[in-house]
Image (spheres, rainbow, N blue to C red):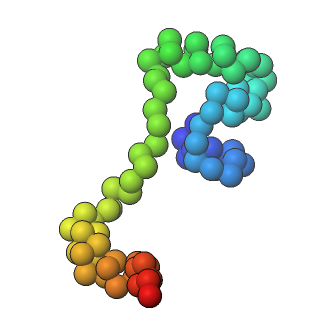
């Protein structure tokens, strides 16, 4: 399954049990229920992992500078009551 789900025609890079079962069936002609795919993957030493929410390239210092310098000029301020 090198190349990820997109190589197999899926819209995202996220593997699901259903997708793995479909790829196994297309590639080898063997049908598995998604639950059984999970059992096979666990026996092979695989584990469930979630993608990171933050980019690795994230520049914390640049974000902090932006928050201090630019954000105060952009955010809405409450209107003064008369």
* 3 versus 24 height, above or below: below
The answer to which image quadrant residue 15 occupies is: top right
Q: Which corner quadrant of the image does residue 56 belong to?
A: bottom left
**Residue found 39% across the figure and 53% down from its top:** 54
The reply to whether residue 27 is in sight is: no
* Residue 82 placement, left or right of 26: left
Q: Position of residue 2 (x, y in %)?
A: 54, 41
Q: Please name whichever residue, 45 or 60, is drawn nearer the observer in this view of the structure.
A: 60
Task: Between residue 5 and residue 29, name the one nearer to us.
Answer: 5
Which quarter of the rendering shows the N terminus? Answer: top right
- Give the answer, above or below, for where 79 lies relative to 28: below
Residue 76, by quadrant, is bottom left
Residue at coordinates 73% horizontally, 17% vertically from top-left?
33
Of residues 23 and 69, the one nearer the viewer is: 69
Farthest-out residue, front: 82
Residue found at the very far bottom of the displayed protein: 82
Q: Which one is in front, 70 or 78?
A: 78
Whether residue 68 is visible to the viewer of this picture, yes or no, is: yes
Q: Is residue 26 above or below residue 9?
A: above
40 on left or right of 25: left
Compared to 76, does 60 lie above or below?
above
Left or right: where 77 falls relative to 19: left
Q: Position of residue 73 (x, y in %)?
A: 34, 85
The structure residue drawn at horizontal position 24% and vertical position 75%, both measured from the top left corner, is 68
At 47% across and 37% down in the image, what residue appears? Answer: 50
In screen coordinates, is 75 left or right of 18? left
Report the number of discs: 0
The quadrant in which the C terminus is found is bottom left
């Amino acid at each position: 399954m090198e190349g990820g789900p997109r190589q197999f025609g899926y819209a995202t890079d996220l593997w699901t049990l259903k997708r793995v079962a479909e790829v196994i069936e297309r590639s080898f002609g063997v049908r598995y229920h998604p639950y059984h795919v999970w059992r096979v993957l666990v026996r092979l030493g695989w584990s469930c992992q979630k993608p990171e929410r933050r980019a690795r390239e994230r520049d914390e210092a640049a974000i902090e500078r932006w928050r201090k310098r630019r954000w105060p000029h952009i955010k809405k301020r409450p209107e003064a009551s008369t």
